[in-house]
Structure formats: structure tokens, C-alpha cells
Image: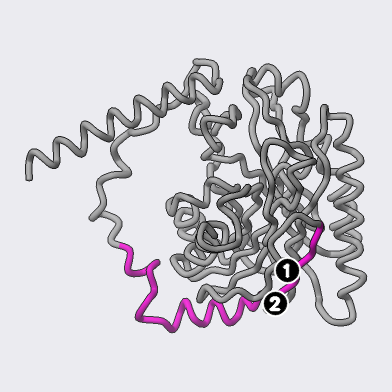
Amino acid sequence: MSRYYAAAVQTAMDCPTDRSAIPARISRMIDLAAGSIEAYGPFHDIRLIAFPEFAHAVPMLRTPAELLKTFAVEVGDIAPAYERFCKLHGCFIQTGTFIERDARYEGHVFNTTLLIGPTGVLSRYRKVNPWIPWEVHSSPHDVPGYNEPLFPVVATEIGNIGCAICYDWLFPEPLRELTMQGAEVLVRVSAYMDPWGATPPMDWWTLFNRARAVENTAFVVAANQGAALRDYPAFSWPGGSMIVDFDGRILAQADPGPCEKVVVAPIDIDALRAERTRRRGHDMRSHFRSEAYSYGRTPMFARAGSNSITIESNNERITEAKRALDGRLNFFGADS
């Protein structure tokens, strides 16, 4: 399957109060996926569908204990309906994220998305860069003894697919790591709020989606929240879900503003592979002088380890990282 269509589906549901709302949300997303495949079927062969971050629940709670009590669920609570749908339609779904509990990591909650295909769950991605200080989920980086892949990439019949969540995309490293693991389609599952939306002069959403596509010579399928302020205080969600090709061209984009929306665009894996093979200029993957850069070998933002993750502890870790950064910059400044 060298050419197919992807759909970025943004949701606009109200803010849940506990996990009892999750089954209805799953049903709504299955309905949106089914409607997209049926409605566009005469025109577009939709094989990949992406939903936004926090599509199952958007918690703004202060501690993991509160999240565990109120919103946290296991993979088995989320996956079955999507698995049945993907098997029936022969498609792939990057689920909206959910607050995950896992008995192997007691006391931790993760912001997690699943890639599900016709054969079932293919990968689980846990957000490596929570939006601190407000998000108190654990990064896998925080967990002592964590030995699962941080950046899984899945080889499928529709290309090699990798995913990163929202704030991860403001760092070039996660997407570069996925690309170096072979990713050809980079999926962004996001709840990217105003004012960093899809309209100038602060259109970070569009900026980073296009930049990461160009940096990595990859397609980007980016699904964003489209909820209004009245439904998700204290934030509003600008939507703007989009699909970008490997040269940074926007192939499809939802108009900015809160609403449910589906945007559809072609993914041409053969064209991508041909360009990755052919190009000698502007191929930042093969031009990357990895040994030239030392900053990634210096610890900066500390692991939480056995310490509880709270908004306050996130702020403390940010302060310590700034001190380390200031010391490093002052050292180099003095040395020069």
C-alpha cells in the first residue's frame, strides 16, 4: 500500500469529571472514524486515523494520586473497541491519549496513546515530555528501572509509523529519534491550546508541524483538540488539525477554532522513500553530525525517581535545571 489517505480527526467534547465518561467518548470516536471511512470511501482510501491528546479525558489535577483515583485506566479498558473497528475496516488508529495506570509502575500515571491495527495493539507511546509544571504524569524518563522503548516505531503495510504527544514536538530530539528508528509517518496527538495555535503571529502549532516534517523528511499527521473554553476551562483549544508532507507543504488543515472536524490528505510512501534515497542536498538525516553535539550527554532536567510528582515538585526541578543551565552557560561565557 504505497499511497493511501490519512484522516486527522479533532474532537470537541466537554470536560469529564471522572472515568465513567470514557466509554461514551470511545463510542463517539468510533462513530467519527466510521463516518470518515464511509463518507470519503468513494474518493479516498482512508487507512490511518489519528485522534487528539486527552480525547478520553483532560485532567487538570495536582497529584498522580488524584489522577489514579479519578481518571486512570488500563490499556485493556481502552483498546478493545478500536481493535474491533480496525480489524473490521483494515485500518490503523492512533488513539487519543488516556491517563494510564500500569501495575508494574506503582504510583505512576502516564499520558498514553496506542497505535492499533487490524491485528491489535501495535505500540504504546507514553509522553516523554509532559507539559510541566501543570502535567503531573510520569515521563518514562522519571521511572526507575524503566526498560521499554521510549520511542517505538512500527513497520506496517502503510509505512513505518511513530508517534509523539503534543509538547514532545517542541523538542527536535523526540522526532529525530523516531526518524532514526525508521519512522516515515510522524503522528502528533495533541491538545495544543491558545495562544500557541494555528493563527499568526503565535501559530506555533503550524510552525512546529511543518518544521518537524522538513527536518526529518517525513509526513506529519497532526490531530488537535477543538474544544471551546466553556467546555474545557481554563484553556481553549484552537483545532487546526493538519497533514503535512515531507517538504513542509500543508496538504490539508482544519480552519482554526473550536469544532469537531475531519481533515483528509494523501500519504505517498513511495514518493517519500524515493526522495529520501535521491536527495543529496537538504537531507538532514544523512547530514546529521551527531558526534559534534555535546549537550545531549549532559544531564539537565532531573529524573523524578522515587519522589512524588506534583506541580510544586515540577517547579523545583525546573528551577534546578535553570541553575544547571545558567552554570553551564556562565562557564562557557567565562571561558570564551
Q: Which residues are magenta?
A: 260-288
Q: Which residue is mark 1?
A: 6
Q: Name the residue: 53% across, 40% down.
A: 128
Q: Hey, which quadrant is residue 41 in on the image?
A: bottom right
Q: Is residue 233 left or right of residue 127?
A: right
Q: Vertically, is 79 above or below 320?
A: below
Counting from the top left corner in percent of width and height, residue 19 is at: 83, 29
Q: Hey, which quadrant is residue 323 in on the image?
A: top left
Secondary structure type for disc 2: strand
Residue closer to the observer: 139 or 210 = 210
Instruction: State the CA–CA distance, disc 1 to disc 2.
Output: 6 Å
Q: Name the residue: 81% across, 57% down.
A: 260
Q: Quadrant location of the C terminus?
A: top left
Q: Is residue 276 magenta?
A: yes
Q: Hey, which quadrant is residue 258 in on the image?
A: bottom right
Residue closer to the observer: 140 or 148 = 140
Callout 1–callout 2 Cβ contact below 8 Å: yes
Q: Quadrant location of the N terminus?
A: bottom right
Q: Which mark is residue 219?
A: none
